[in-house]
Image (spheres, grey):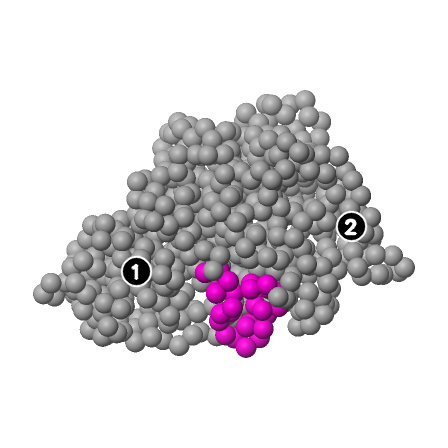
Amino acid sequence: MTAVGAGEETPGAAGSPVAAESPAVAGVTPSAFEGAARLESALGCPFDPGSGMSLAGGLRADEHEREPTAAYEAAWAAGLHRHLVPVSEGGALASFEAFAAVARVVSRRDLAVSVGFGSTLLAATPVWVWGSEEQRRRVADLVLGRAWGTAGISEEAAGSDLLATATRAVPAAGGHVLDGRKWLVGNGSRSAFATVLAACDPSYGLFLLDFEAIGGHGVRRLPKVRTHGLRGHDLSGFELAGCRVGADAVLGRPGRGIEMVSGMLQFTRTLVGASSLGAADTALRVALRHARDRVLYGQPALALPPVRSLLARAFTDLLVAECTELAAARGLDVARRRMALWSAVAKYAVPRLCVDAVHACGEVLSARAHLREGVAGGAFQKLLRDVSVTPVFEGTELVQLDTVRSQLAAAARRPRGPAQVPLPLLFGFGDPAPSPAPRELRPSLTFGGADEIVDALDETVQDLADDAELAPLARMLLTIRDENRSAFRALGTGRTTEAYEAARTHCLVHTAACVLHTWRLRGEQFGGLAAKRHWVSLALRRVLARLGRPVAPDPEAEDLLVRHLVQLDDGDRAFSLVPLRIAPQYRD
């Protein structure tokens, strides 16, 4: 992907206008996205059936419920696995903002591939953060050697309740003996290593299992679980029976397993949103091209106001999700002490927004959205099934809302903490940032009581006081935020329906705040669409509608947004506020 600038409009393909590149920035990619740029170029266009990670190839594997081996080979050849290993350990993972861009590139092609590598990252993250030098070196060697990892956390009876973990680790001479069954875990049947949560003395522990070193003794792989979406992903498990491991298998301090799992999920649940964004980009591209080609009532379907409105709605949801995801991913690098809250907010909001965007694209395609042939080779129905799984990964929506509820309920009983994260740093997407290796700044179990993203709405409302269009929308958000804070103070700590609704409200206000901060702090630097006001108007209206405060639609803004969508597609650019070029598009 290559950055492009905001220039004058010139005629593009099929008579559509495209934004001319500014010579001053043409070919310049923000530093955080350089790895994604190289990966995008190496993988080629997903619409090209001849590319290694094509939509057609992923669909064939999905139809037969088998792994997309050609796509994995293309990913390895392009060096995707190197982005799972920190630079400090010999890999290419320099920041989590950069990795989010990489995950989006891969998911634009096949979510099954993204999830497979993501499962390895989930397994490796506690090693990077809490592992010994020897443990880090061993896992780095495995991952750089193209090995899979699995996080042995989930159990069939326990679900998301970590305290219900039944797997046990009993002390034995020189180590532990593990017994238990891990189920519905990614890469369970093909993994070379695993990080396993087990009950032990004095409490729960996290163990690193090197299956090669164990030699298969006491380990039985479970069969792949058949799923509706992500059919090509190895979602399976393994059973441990008398599995003996040495003392060097213990990760971190004994008895801190629950704490470590909670911390590692802050990384991975944040990054699920990036995968959702990649899938939504492709779904929107499929719907847009169909609307441009499909003739209805003597004109392209794109000329029909209801179709344009659906596309505008999908693109708006994608942009709201992007603002939220960019802030969360960068927060992992510059504001990790806030991620106990922000990661759960992002995990709840971003996949849901992307799923809604894909459903709107399905309405554009109508009956063709459900066909296994035709438009885009029938790939859309796979996209829809795959992206629908993302709200479940790393904890369901209810799990995320429970995390948000508990964090905010605890904070409501204390004085609000001081702001410590400068918003220009947090929203300086693409700029260099002090990005420590994961082990140099470990996750916190609480967010510290300050939430700079939502707190800064006061300042934003003041700055927009003279804006006749956006000020009323921002004031509505501020009122909702204040009402919701009062609700948290009154609700207490119980798991009530009202408490979960208050958590949902906070998540949505957070997304709207991310939109405003992105526009105000990054719009002029990015230029193009990011600097415009119409997308902000539509984004705030979409969030307010979800909050039960619908406001009048803005048809003019929708029309402008769809025009920009066409320009981005014709110019081979990502459906993004970040000015990035994608691989030259294959057009049948």
Q: Which residue occupies the extreme right position in the image? A: 298
Q: Residue at x 77, y 57 (%)?
A: 291
Residue 72 appears left or right of 530 = left
Label 1: how many residues lie within 10 Å, few (<14), some (14-19) or many (20+)? many
Membership of 457 in magenta stretch: no
Q: Residue at x 20, y 50 (%)?
A: 253
Q: Amino acid at mark 1?
A: Thr
Marks 2 & 1, CB-CB < 8 Å contact? no
Q: Which residue is mark 2?
A: 13
Look at the image and tell me in which quarter the C terminus lies: bottom right
Membership of 59 in magenta stretch: yes
Q: Nearer the viewer, residue 566 or 2?
A: 2
Residue 437 quadrant:
top left
Q: Nearer the viewer, mark 2 or mark 1?
A: 2
Give the residues in magenta: 51-76
Q: Amino acid at mark 2?
A: Ala
Q: In the structure shown, which secondary structural element does the residue marked by tag 2 occupy?
A: helix
Q: Which residue is mark 1?
A: 195
Relative to residue 159, is residue 536 depicted above or below? above
In the rendered structure, which disc, 2 or 1, sits on the residue that comes first in sequence?
A: 2
Q: How many marks?
A: 2
Q: Position of residue 533 (x, y in %)?
A: 69, 34
Q: Position of residue 454 (x, y in %)?
A: 50, 34
Relative to residue 85, is residue 430 depicted above or below? above
Residue 109 appears left or right of 75 = right
Q: In the structure shown, which secondary structural element does the residue marked by tag 1 occupy?
A: strand
Q: Residue at x 45, y 55 (%)?
A: 79
Q: Nearer the viewer, residue 289 or 413?
A: 289
Residue 359 seen from this side: no
Q: Which residue occupies the extreme left position in the image? A: 173
Q: Position of residue 429 (x, y in %)?
A: 52, 37
Q: Residues under labels 2 and 1: Cα distance?
A: 51 Å
